[in-house]
Image: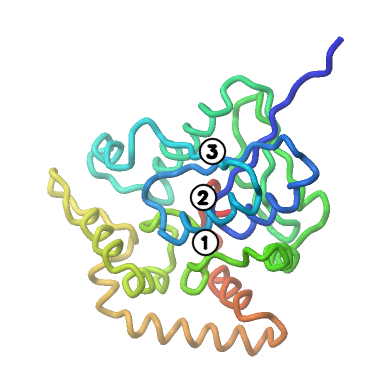
């Protein structure tokens, strides 16, 4: 009787953890299939990083796309922007394309959750998709992830200079300082995010940040930046031996533990 055949897949987000996992498993699982769920609303730095990683891995990264894009689903949801309680963007633009890609095949999905994290990530409800957590299994923590990507030569994505995680440019999980950095780094994308808040046929107002609109937030950008600098200064003082990139990532992580399970690995 022939052995049961499994597909092996690994999702890449353009973030440090999934990148490190792909490099970690590169020689261990030669038939692994890489995929990237492209919402067409990602940061330019994310696309740049995915392209670099594809060259480094020496294998195609499957670009998965939803049959209908974000703007279509926004219309379907009557202009209601996705938020922490209603993550329709994740379901429609990430999960459904992934599950279509897998189909009914028996599949092992490798997930980049570290041993020092208290979260589970996205686990499919489909019985034919089995999750495996190599970093948790082998005890790898954040410092190991930075070591893997630095030793590979790819380093961290360029957005790490101002943002802690990958994901859509208008992701509602962004911290206030990250919205300000988006405004400073990609003004056109910030303005597009503002338009999504303002332009609805039913006249209602929806905000990415539940507390205030982006135009209100940016009016006090100087204070937001000052407060963030104080947080960074304190974190660096408390962790003098951490590289700056780790301090930046750690400081933003400390503000909230919310994130998109699929996007931010």
Q: Are marks 2 and 1 in contact (CB under 8 Å)?
A: yes
Compare residues 222 and 31 and report the one nearer the observer.
31
Badge 1 is on which residue?
A: 165
Badge 2 is on which residue?
A: 263
Compare residues 208 and 93 and report the one nearer the observer.
93
Q: Which residue is at a point 57% across and 58% down the rendered structure image?
A: 15
Q: Which residue is at a point 36% across and 47% down the rendered structure image?
A: 82
Q: Quadrant of the N terminus?
A: top right
Q: Is residue 225 above or below residue 9?
A: below
Picture disc at residue 62: 3
Camera-side mark, 2 or 3: 3
* Mark 2–mark 3 distance (CA, rounded to whole Å): 15 Å
* Mark 2–mark 1 distance (CA, rounded to whole Å): 8 Å
Compare residues 24 and 170 and report the one nearer the observer.
24
Q: Which residue is at a point 38% across and 80% down the rendered structure image?
A: 224
Secondary structure beneath label 1: loop
Q: Residues within 10 Å of mark 1 (few under 14, many from 20)?
A: many
Where in the figure is residue 195, as x and y percent of width and height? 21, 57
Location of residue 62 by image quarter: top right
Q: Earlier in the sequence, mark 2 or mark 1?
A: 1
Q: Is residue 136 left or right of residue 205?
A: right
Q: Earlier in the sequence, mark 2 or mark 3?
A: 3
Q: Is residue 145 left or right of residue 168?
A: right
């Amino acid at each position: 009787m022939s052995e049961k055949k499994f597909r092996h897949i690994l999702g890449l987000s353009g973030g440090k953890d999934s990148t490190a996992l792909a490099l970690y498993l590169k020689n261990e699982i030669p038939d692994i299939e890489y995929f990237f769920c492209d919402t067409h609303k990602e940061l330019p730095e994310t696309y740049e990083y995915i392209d670099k990683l594809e060259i480094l891995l020496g294998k195609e990264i499957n670009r998965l796309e939803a049959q209908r894009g974000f703007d279509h689903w926004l219309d379907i949801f009557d202009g209601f922007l996705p938020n922490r309680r209603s993550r329709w963007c994740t379901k429609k633009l990430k999960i459904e394309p992934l599950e279509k890609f897998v189909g009914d095949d028996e599949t092992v999905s490798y997930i980049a959750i570290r041993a020092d994290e208290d979260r589970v990530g996205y686990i499919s409800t489909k019985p034919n998709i089995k999750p495996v957590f190599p970093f948790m299994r082998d005890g790898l923590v954040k410092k190991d992830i930075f070591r893997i990507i630095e030793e590979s030569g790819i380093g961290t994505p360029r957005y790490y200079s101002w943002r802690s995680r990958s994901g859509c440019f208008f992701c509602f999980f962004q911290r206030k300082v990250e919205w300000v950095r988006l405004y400073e780094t990609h003004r056109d994308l910030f303005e597009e995010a503002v338009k999504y808040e303002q332009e609805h046929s039913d006249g209602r107002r929806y905000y990415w940040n539940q507390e205030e609109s982006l135009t209100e937030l940016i009016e006090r950008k100087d204070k937001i930046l000052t407060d963030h600098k104080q947080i960074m200064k304190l974190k660096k003082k408390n962790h003098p031996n951490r590289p700056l990139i780790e301090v930046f990532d750690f400081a933003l992580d400390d503000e909230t533990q919310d994130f998109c399970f699929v996007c931010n690995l």
